[in-house]
Amino acid sequence: MTYCAKCYLWQSVGEEFLPDRIASKFGNCHKHIETELSVLQPLLLIAFEETVVDLLKIHYQIDGFSGTPCLCQVSIDGKIYPLLALPQAISQEEIADLSFKLSNLANEVKTILSQQREMLETKPRTVRFSQ
């Protein structure tokens, strides 16, 4: 799990986040996400809430987005990732509706997650110093 704005603390007014400040922070921080993705090589990205998709659209190309929930694609740093965009479901009715809609995407998601990841060669985690 990662966050769109990583390098600054969130600033809020009451319970509401300021959308213009979030976009500004994301503009300063989106390269951190590119670095994480290049290391982790995820098979699937999941965006919670349409606001996150809107932030991604500022810096990256998103194809096939038709509102939440949907399975679309985002191009980040020259690589195309499947993107599962999910709405915020709070009430029992919204959760039930989301479950039904996700069941229609289940086979596609399983196919994506069954693929082999292209991991970079691992580097040593320890360094030995000697005289």
Image: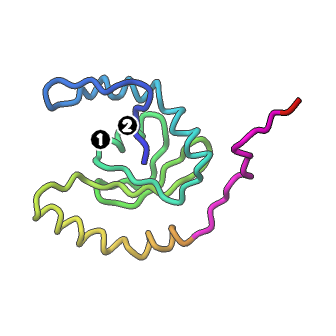
Q: Position of residue 108 (x, y in %)?
A: 44, 72
Q: Which mark is residue 51?
A: 1
116 relative to 59 in the view: left or right: right
Q: Which residue is mark 2?
A: 55
112 relative to 65 in the view: left or right: right
Residue 119 image-quadrant placement:
bottom right
Graded by Cα atoms within 10 Å as few (under 14), some (14 to 19) or many (20 or more), the crowding at tag 1 reads some
- Considering the numbered disc 1 on the image, is that residue within a helix, a strand or a loop? helix
Q: Verify CB contact (< 8 Å) between mark 2 and mark 1.
A: yes
Name the colouring of the figure. Answer: rainbow
The residue type indicated by label 2 comes to Leu
- Considering the numbered disc 2 on the image, is that residue within a helix, a strand or a loop? helix
Distance CA(mark 2)–CA(mark 1): 6 Å
Residue 128 highlighted magenta (yes or no): yes
Q: Is residue 41 above or below residue 96?
A: above
Q: Residue furthest front?
A: 131
Nearer to me, 9 or 88: 9
Rendered-image quadrant of the C terminus:
top right
Q: Position of residue 128 (x, y in %)?
A: 79, 38
Residue 52 highlighted magenta (yes or no): no
Q: Which residues are magenta?
A: 115-129
Q: Is residue 23 above or below residue 84?
A: above
The residue type indicated by label 1 comes to Thr
Nearer to me, 95 or 50: 95
Nearer to me, 21 or 59: 21
Q: Residue at x 41, y 39 (%)?
A: 57
Nearer to me, 12 or 62: 12
Q: Is residue 59 above or below residue 42?
A: above
Q: Residue at x 18, y 63 (%)?
A: 95
